Image (spheres, rainbow, N blue to C red):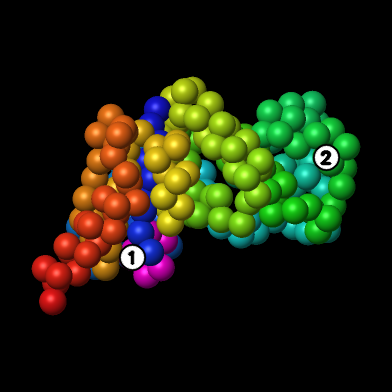
Amino acid sequence: GEIYAMLGGNGAGKTTAINLFLNFIDPSEGEALIGGIVTHRDPIAAKKQVAFVSENVMLYPNFTALQNLDYFSRLGGRTGYTREDYRKVLLRVGLQEEAHAKKLRTYSKGMRQKCGIAIAILKDAPAILLDEPTSGLDPKAGLEFIALLQELRDEGRAILMSTHDIFRAKQVADKVGIMNRGRLVAEKHRSELEGEDLEKLYVAYMAGYMEAAV
């Protein structure tokens, strides 16, 4: 597997790129592929290859975590899971057992993110898309989330995360792409980032691109 971080400021095109992979919008040119499938040509097949966790996870606040997992699993056509399956995956993502039967309206943002990741894991898709996954998380929740992403990567999943969090990108990503004005203006492998200041690199690429665009 691999974790790819798309870095960029607001309006850089990160969320638009994810929306293209999810077939929420049509490309003005070129193609978006998931698992070799062109998303706008075969959206149903493409969506089977990917799970998505948004910045503000949209789950049912009056459902418990267990009920949300059951609902979204059934909605995705996966009807074979048991309550024990749900319990195990919630524990795996770091939600303690006493939280499983609580309604999501009582959850913190970090807890909702964990529930969203649990749903993504149950979909068992080879690719996971994340939009600003660590935004608003406290340091402990952020570290736990990053550790889980690395575990999923090691299991063979491809993970694409959009973020403006340079520290987390360098911490977790195998590759980092820098976006500006809807274009990928730079790409670095993890080995190239060791010993480099990613923040300075990011500012330099953004400044250089802006100068070239003027």
- Above or below for 170 versus 85: below
**Earlier sequence position, callout 1 versus callout 2:** 1
Q: Nearer the viewer, mark 1 or mark 2?
A: 1
Q: How many marks?
A: 2
Q: Quadrant of residue 175?
A: top left
**Residue depicted at x 37% and y 70%:** 11
Amino acid identity at mark 1: Ala
> In 3D space, how far apart are the residues under numbered discs 1 and 2 (Cα atoms)?
37 Å
Circles 1 and 2: CB atoms closer than 8 Å: no
Residue reaching furthest to the bottom: 214
- Above or below for 90 versus 183: above
**Residue depicted at x 50% and y 30%:** 150
- Per the rendered image, the range of residues in magenta is 10-15
Q: Nearer the viewer, residue 77 or 155?
A: 155
CA neighbours of label 2 inside 10 A, class few (<14), some (14 to 19), many (20+): some
Amino acid identity at mark 2: His
Residue 114 is covered by the magenta coloring? no
* Residue 68 left/right relative to 191: right
Q: Quadrant of residue 213?
A: bottom left
Give the position of the C terminus as an image quadrant: bottom left
* Residue 57 left/right relative to 21: right
* Residue 146 left/right relative to 46: right
CA neighbours of label 1 inside 10 A, class few (<14), some (14 to 19), many (20+): some
- Above or below for 61 versus 173: below
Indicate the position of residue 62 as horizontal and vertical percent values.
Answer: 83, 58
Q: Which residue in the structure is indicated by mark 2?
A: 100
Residue 13 is covered by the magenta coloring? yes
- Residue 12's tag is 1
